[in-house]
Every structure is written in structure tokens, then in C-alpha cells.
Amino acid sequence: MTDLAQSLIDALALGGLYALIAIGVTLVYTVMGMMNFAQGEFIMLPAYALYVLAGLPFAVAVGGALATGIGIAVLAERVAFRPVRNADLSAQLVTSLAVATVLQNVVSATVDARAQSVATPRVLSESSQIGALSVPNLEILTLVLTAVVLGALGWLLYRTRTGLEMRAAAENFEMARLLGVRANRVIAIAFAISGALAAIAGVLIVMQTGQVSPTMGLTPVLVGFIAVVIGGFGRIFGAVVGGLVLGALSSLLGAYLPDGLVPFRDAIVFSLPVAILIVRPQGLLGAATGEARI
Amino acid sequence: MSGGLRSPASAAISLAVPLVLVALTAAVGASGTPAFEETVTLILCNLVVVLGLQVFIGNSGVYSFGQLGFAASGGYVAALLSIPAAFAALQTPELPKLIADAQLSSLLSILIAAVASAMLAAAVGWPLMRTSTLAIPISTFAFLIVAYNVFANWDPVTGGSSGLVSIPRTTDVASAGIWAALAVVVTLVFKGSASGYRLQATREDEVAARSIGIGLMRERLIAFTISGMLCGIGGALEVHQSGVLSPDTFYFAASVTTITMLVVGGAGSVFGAVVGTLAVATVNELLRNFEEGAHVLGPVSIGETPGLAAIGLGLILLATMVALPQGLTGGREAGEIASSRRRLRSRAPSTPSAAKAANGAGPRPARGSAGSLRAEGISLAFSGLNVLREIELELSPGEALGLIGPNGAGKTTLVNVLSGFQAPDSGSVLLDGVDVTGWSPARLARAGLGRTFQAGLPFAGLTGMESVAVGAMGVGVGRRRAVEVAAGVLRRLGLSEQAQSPAGLQPPGSQRLLGIARALATGPRYLLLDEPAAGLNDEERRELVAILSGVVEDFGCAILLIEHDMNVVMDLCSRAQVLDGGGTVVVGSPEEVQAHPAVVEAYLGTSYAAGAHA
């Protein structure tokens, strides 16, 4: 029983982390219809900020990571993504691939192409006793952060003018513009939030693995993409569900997979969602899209 | 030249220029130092992979990030089949003895790698091509990571993350050049085949492609498989060049490099793939020299900087997407670039020789069958709003039926139901007595039901000739015959003049007619026209009426015509059906309909009364 409860908490924590990543991908997708490969680098660069600021107090380093995530996301939007804002999905995807490549290799060239280890605060590698369960503090932090972020995002989207503008832009960008929504502002805000979410995810990943590498964003961004796809494109709630499903799947497979298959866990985790897409091309929560043009 | 899809001269140039480029590259490589020759050999191997990408990405317009997984499978198959048995026993202890001891010749190992990669691509593509256009880039990216995960962790068979060594090094610049030349031929032949054209039609417009009988998943899967085969060959060649293979050889970095090559050259053309590969490889090699620390401009030196080449690659890709999204070649073949230059000087004359493949050219079913297109009790509601209510409709062979009604009456929705784009909530559609409710648009098109769209939905990147010919190809007509059919239809509709210029660049009137021509080329028995006259000026409208009035007779198909302009309906149709609010108001001869009080009130009003005197 405790084993199962333990597994479920592990699953929920990993799912929460994945949900944070997926929300970041979704936000950008909703306001400009772009699947952003560079979201993985928005995760990787803040992680490197932690590495570079390792000597400073932890809170300062985390602040630096957040600033890095927001800064790089806003900068990438301004420099690279604004010129292709009206291009088709493929062109935007390839553009974001280019941005990802540049950022990855700038880190390779300036820091190192190999992974570097990062010291983590001891309190995060300890566990707390909750009833009969011993829960790692990092998982508690992840769950709390996910809850706080979801709450804050909900408040922003549904209780503020900016949120209303973002939702309007997500529904019909051109119409929203005609009604006075400032496109550049809404998109920049979406990127900033997306960068902040990625930074949080990046910090959590470093706390978990204790290391950084230039390609560390690759698997998370795929996780984010797949979560978005199975959650139904462009739905925040869908992204959360997609993230939780993927996290739970990955975590439970890790716990219950026979030893010989454990190295292939990622292969299995990434294959199963494709099966979902074949049965439901519109994702778990997505509505069937109508033929709007005819 | 309106007699063919592309003029023979243009086709010859399109083939010759890339081949000459490949031959020149190989010759330059052979004349350099051994190290330079090896570099050029690798570039040619890379070219085979990039051509593989072009087959799928270029023709479908959908990005796959997983094709390097097939290069990896090709590389592993070729390596495992050709590594000397003694080394195989050390590196891959659990490899089946048959494979470990095979020690095949390189050529044989490459051929088997090609077949294996094609089979893997077919097996992987079968489910992946069923995902949506939005999801394919992501699901193929997932495949790349899954493939990497398997190759890197299946130690006893693949050597795991440390990879394989002692692979016979047999690929030289000549053999790589020959394979690259073969790959150029394969990609060009595919692009010009009926299957290639059908896939390009889906790239230009998915909805219109389905309306002419094209099965989206099938066409994508064919190209995905051929692409996998070419990538597998490229991967096999590459491991026989370097002699080593690690899972990282064909992973994310290689994906970015090959996609950059394709995009920079222009994904739409084989010429672009070749130009892009050579251009990007050249820049890449220069940057790599800097990476190792080179002296630039005498005293200025750059230190050892790994990643510099990749940064350069990323910036080139970024600059291309921002400034030149169609790539250096504009996505056009060498012959097309040459002939568009020529066209600037003199308009290509239309050849009357195509005329002999005239009116009766379509695949014509036996006429006069007792069947008809029938809608029985069709009802449909969108989120509680009744869009169609118990609609009955019958379109008999050879007749022209007008479907009229105010905006929002449900006319287009009814056409969508009849043509399979929208499933009704209840009721059924019968095609010559067969219940076809729930059939896909493509299947209905192949069964003889054609349609056009209010928005036109032209295949903008194809020429007029190609967009019409692909209509015939869509329902399974062979390439040669499709050209004859298209020439006949184009001539009949008076479009032969502009047949060789891109559909997207033609005036609205011509585009509208091209849409009708495209549907006619499928040889329909029933043709549904959704407001063909909308947006045309008076002259174009008169022309259209003149053309349509001959269509029923010449092409032997019945027409369902959605039209706002009562005069057009009067001129063309023997019967008219009036919809309002999703229900039928009246069916009858145009005169009866015109006189019906509900129609006068609900739809025609006073404006028609005024119009009738004009």
C-alpha cells in the first residue's frame, strides 16, 4: 500500500514538472500558433545560470535563473520569431529549431560541450516523513510549485485584462488585433511567462539530476510537445492533463518495468502517446476540428 | 507547351544540372588530398540523406524530424552485416550468428540496409502518417528519440553507446558520387510520378486534394517509405566511409544539419536539395577549420571553439527562414528556373496538338444508368443549432439543379455532407442506389462525385496544367493519360493559354475555372459547384455561364449549382431547390420557384423583381 502511494506521489511530482513544461509550450502555441523547439533551451539556459551563479546564495542563483529564462524567451521572440510570425507552422518550427541549435552551441562553445555537475542545497535531497510515507523534499517542492503556478496562471488568464487579451488572441488573433489587443505586447507576455515556466522547470531538473549539459532541453521539449499534442493543441488544461499522463506513465514504468527493459523506458514512454494520436488525432481533450475553410 | 506537365527541355535541364553538380563535386574531391577526398565523400553521402528528406518533406510540405532514424537503421544494418566475424563477436556478442558471420560485401550490405530501412519506414510510417499534419513533426521527432534510445541501450546487438568500429571502409568519392546521382534520379522520378503529384497536391491544399480522390495517408506513407530507403542508403554509405558508428552519428545534430541543407537550398526541389547540401557543407567545413583554431588574416587567430560550426549552421538556418523561406532555388527545379526566364521574353504559345485528346477524354462511366445522387432525410445540428432539417434532394444524370437560398440557409453544409466532408446526424446519401453515407471525400471522388469550393482552394504552387492533371491522377488515372485528360479539359474551358503558369499567380476568374477543370478531370458523374460565380465581374460571369452550359452535355455529368444570382440559375438549370433556415422551401422549375410566394418574400424580395427586368 505504501509502495503504491509512494509511486503515485512520484508520478504526480514528475507529472507536475512535465505539466509546467507543457504549459510553456502551449502558451506560445495559443498566441502565435508555433510549436517552439527552443523551449528546451529556455529550460537549459536557466539551468546554466544556476551553474554559473553557484557561489552565490541559492535564492540569488534561482532569481538569476528566472531572469535568464524570461530574458532569453523575450529576446528570442523579438529577434527570431517576430519576423516569421505569419509564416506557416512548418516554417516557424524550423525557425525555432535554428534558435535551439544556436543557443545549444553557444553554451557548448562558451562553457563546455560536456555535462557539468551542479551542487544542490542539501535540504532538497532529504526527505520528509508524512504519515508512513517518506517523501523527498524535492517532490514536495515540485508539487507545491506546480499548484502555485497553475493558480497564478488561472488568475492571470481569467481575472486580468492581460489574460483576457491573451485568450482573445488565442481564439482569433486578427480579430483580437482589430479590437485593440496589442499583438506585440500579448505575444511578448506569453513568451515571458513561458520563459519563467521553463526556468522553474530547469531549476527543478537540475535539483533532480545535479548536472547541466547543452542538450539537456531535448527530452523535456519533446515531453512538452507530446503533452500538448495528447492534451489537444492549444488548451492549457489539456497541457496539464497531457503532462500528468506522461509523467505518471514515465514514473510508473520506471517503478514497475522489468530490469531488462528499464533502459528502454523513454522509448516506451514516447511510443505510447503516438498510439493515442492514432485513435484520437485531435488528442485526449481536443474537440474534432471542423472544416472551417469550406 | 501545354502538351505535357513539364516541357521536355525543362525536364532535361532539371535532371542534368543536379547530375553535373554531383559529378563536379566528386571530380573536385578526387583531385584533392586524401583528407579532402574523404570530406567530399562524406558530403556526397550526406546528399543522399538530404535527397531522402526532400522526397518526404519537399513533396508533402510536412516536416519530419525522424528521417535520421532511418539513416541510423541503414548504418547499423550495413555495419553489422559487414563487420568481420572476429570483431563482431567482440562488439556484439548477442547478435545472431547468421548476421555476425555474414561478412557481406559492402554493396550487398548497402542494398540490404536500403530494404531494411524502407521496411522500417513503412512500419513506423503506417501509424505516424495517421496522425494529423500538426502532429507529424512531433511524432517523427519522438521516433528519432525512441530510435536513439534503442540503438544506444541495446548493447549486446548494437554495441550500445560506445558504438561500432572495424566497419570495412569501402565508400570512396566515386561510389558515393554514383549513389548520389542515383538518388537524384530517384527523387526526380518520384516527384514527376502520379504519386509524387498527388502528394504535392496535398501540400498545396489538403482539403482540395481530398476532393479529387487523393488519399492523404497513403500518399504520405509512400513518400515516407522511399525517403526512409534513401536515408538508409545514405547512412550505410556513411558508415562504410568512416568505418565507425555511434548512436550520436545520426541523431539530433545530424537532423539539424540535413534539414538546414534542405531548407537553405529550397525544400520544394531536388535542385534545392543538391545546392543546399553543397552550400551548407562548404560553409560548415570552413567553420570547422576555425573550430580547430586557425589563423585568419595573419595575426588574427581564433582559438579552439567547439560548437562554432553548429552556431554558424543555426544562424544560416535562421537567416534563411527569415529572409528567404523558399531557399536559394525558390523551391524550383533547374529547368523551371531556366524556362521562367525564357517566358519573360516570350509567352509560351499553346499547342493545338493537345486538342485531339479532347472532350471525351475523362474516364467516362456508362451514361444513362438508372442511378442518381440522392439525399434522404439529411439532418445536422452544430451545437444545438439546426443547420439542415430533413433535407431531400435528387440529382439525376445529365441534369443541372440549382441550389439557392439566403446566406446561412445551409447550402454549403449540404454540399459538404453530399461530398463526404461532413457527416450528417441522421439521414443518408445514396450514389446510384449505394448508401455512401460516411464515405471519405476521396472515396466519393473516386466513385464519381466531384466538387469545387467557394474559396477556390487552388494548388497555388503547381501550374494550371499540373493542377488539372493531378485531378485525374487523384482518381487513379496514369500520368500520361492524366495529361491528355487535362489538356482536353483545359482546352474546353479555354484555359490552355495559361496552362504553364502557376495556378496561384493567375487572375481570380482563371483560378475559379481551374477549380472546375480540376474537378472535371476526375471524370465526375455528379459535380457539385459551390458558388462558382462569386467574386467574378460581369464579363467573367457571362463567360462562366457559357462554359457551364456546355459542361453537362460535353462531360456527361450532372451539376448541382449553388448560386446567389438568380439569372445564372435561370440560364443554366432545369430545376431549382430553395433552402432557407436549413429546410427546403420549394423544388421545381425555375419559373415555379420564382413565382413561389415564400421565395419571393424570403429570398428574392424586391431586388430580384428589379433584376428580372434588366
Image (cartoon, coloured by chain):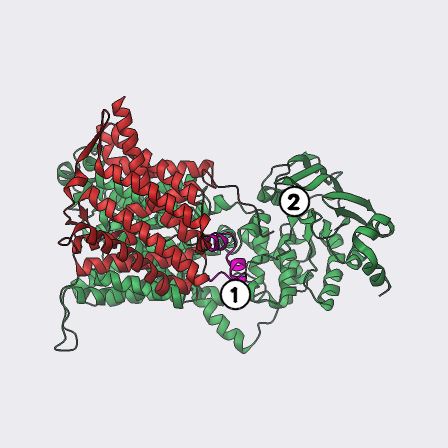
Chain colours: A red, B green
Write down the chain letter for disc 2. B
User: Which of the marked residues, 1 or 2, is nearer the chain's N terminus?
Assistant: 1
Residue range (magenta): A164-182
Number of callouts in the render?
2
Mark 1 lies on residue: B7
Write down the chain letter for disc 1. B
Picture disc at residue B448: 2
Q: Amino acid at mark 2?
A: Gly
Residue B323 in view, yes or no: yes
Q: Residue at x 35, y 37 (%)?
A: A244
Disc 2 residue crowd, few under 14, some 14–19, many 20+, Cα 10 Å: many
Residue A171: in magenta span: yes
Residue A16: in magenta span: no
Kindly report the distance in space between the C-alpha atoms of the residues bearing marks 1 and 2.
31 Å
Of circles 1 and 2, which is in front? 2
Q: Is residue A89 left or right of residue A75?
A: right
- Give the main secondary structure of the magenta stretch: helix
